[in-house]
Image: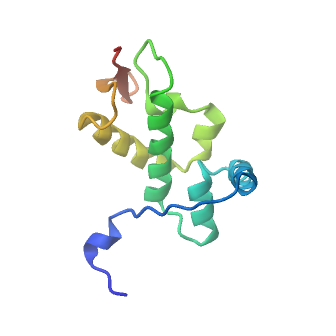
Amino acid sequence: MQFNNDDLYCMKNVRVTMSDEVFMRLKTEAKEAGYPGISSYLLSKVDGLTTDAEAAEIVKKGRFRVTRKKLDKPFRLKDLFEKDEWDGFSKAARLASGRMFFEQVKEGGIDGVEVGEKNSTNHQTYIQIKD
């Protein structure tokens, strides 16, 4: 198999079907091991977990959570996570996920969310738009 430079920067998706029992077991194992989700946990098992993969998982969870919460004030990406969960992500992945989330919001890729101001600690905030 031959790769070009574009392949190095493009994240690929793989869909896996599993039983409820296997799903729950992997979900529990991932959480206990401190991974953001099953996909990052499985990638870690084959030495394939990269900062970008972990960051993409964080953004995916953030997107899911922001669409299911009612937020009455500006929020940061990290506000969508429990403290222990957020602190469990690598610093590099947290920084990368912040950039990814910002770009998605800026490009209109997350419905109902707009870019807000930077706060006093220079963290980017976001505003949930009411329908």
**From the image, which quarter does the N terminus lie in?**
bottom left
Q: Is residue 51 above or below residue 83?
A: below
Q: Which percent across, then down, holds residue 116?
A: 30, 23
Could you tell whether 2 is left or right of 65 in the image? left
73 in relation to 32, above or below: above
Looking at the image, residue 26 sits to the left or right of residue 109; the answer is: right
Q: Quadrant of the C terminus?
A: top left
The x, y position of residue 128, in whole percent, is 37, 20
Measured from the top left, where is residue 60 in percent x and y?
46, 44
Residue located at (65% from left, 59% from top): 18
Q: Quadrant of residue 10?
A: bottom left
Q: Residue 44 lies in what quarter of the image?
A: bottom right
Most extreme residue toward the left, as rendered?
107
Considering every residue shown, the one lying at the far bottom of the view is 1
* Residue 27 shows up from this direction: yes
Q: Residue at x 34, y 34 (%)?
A: 110
Q: Position of residue 41 (x, y in %)?
A: 62, 58
**Residue, x 58% and y 71% (percent of image)?**
47
